Image: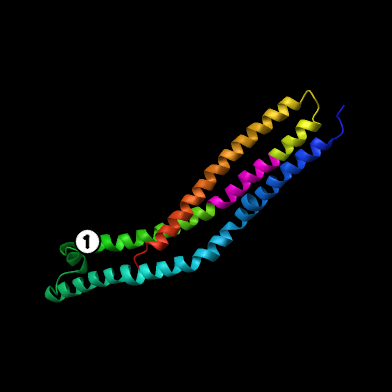
Amino acid sequence: MVNPPDAAYWTALGILLVPAGAGLKYLVWDFFQMPETLHSRFSTAVTEAHAAIHERWFLPTLVQIHDQVNARKELLKAASTTDILMELPIDAQVREAMAAVSERNSLDRAFGRAAWACPWVAISWLIVICSSLTLFFAIHHAVPGWKTVYTWGLILAIATASTAGMVFFGLFLRSRNKLIRLLGGNRF
């Protein structure tokens, strides 16, 4: 027979519900909303960085290559564009253009990875909070023969989900900080 709840039970429940509520707000709800927050906070900066990279780095490099090819073509009218490209020393300009494309892709990847990790952070911490609340009630209301099984199963779920939550939270912070660093360190 299960004993009725006493004052210690209600105190423990109150102490458990405050951090559970805070966790639901900050680790679950906010992270489910985080992709939209990231988009509203960084989309303009990412778009401006893309435009700056394209206009100030990528296009001038292509114009240099185009000018070199046209200048050479005027000297060798019979040569094809492919022959001229093979002959000209444009390796540095091609590397510069590829670096511009790589910089743009780095911005997109950092933004995408930060947005990708958000739902996983929320799901992991939702599992931790629900398992913790279930563990609290399982200890007090479970059938005595199954209490140990419930307890260890829920402790394993809490440990696994909290580890996953910390890993995904770390991945989110790493990607978000890389995005901020790329936007702040953008030389254009």
Image-quadrant location for residue 12: top right
Instruction: State the residue position of label 1.
Output: 92
Give the amino acid at mark 1: Ala
Q: Position of residue 146 (x, y in %)?
A: 76, 25
Range of residues picked out in magenta: 117-131
User: Above or below — where is 132 with respect to 71?
Assistant: above
Q: Position of residue 50 (x, y in %)?
A: 41, 67
User: Above or below — where is 105 with respect to 62?
Assistant: above
User: Above or below — where is 112 with respect to 46?
Assistant: above
Identity of the residue drawn at 37% across and 70% down: 52
Q: Position of residue 166 (x, y in %)?
A: 55, 43
Residue 118 falls within the magenta-colored stretch: yes
Residue 109 visible, this angle: no
Image-quadrant location for residue 134: top right
Q: Is residue 52 left or right of residue 65?
A: right
Identity of the residue drawn at 50% across and 54% down: 114
Image-quadrant location for residue 140: top right
Identity of the residue drawn at 54% across and 46% down: 168
Residue 161 visible, this angle: yes
Q: Is residue 5 left or right of residue 16?
A: right
Which quarter of the rendering shows the N terminus?
Answer: top right
Magenta residues: mostly which secondary structure? helix
Residue located farthest toward the top when viewing the structure as drawn: 145
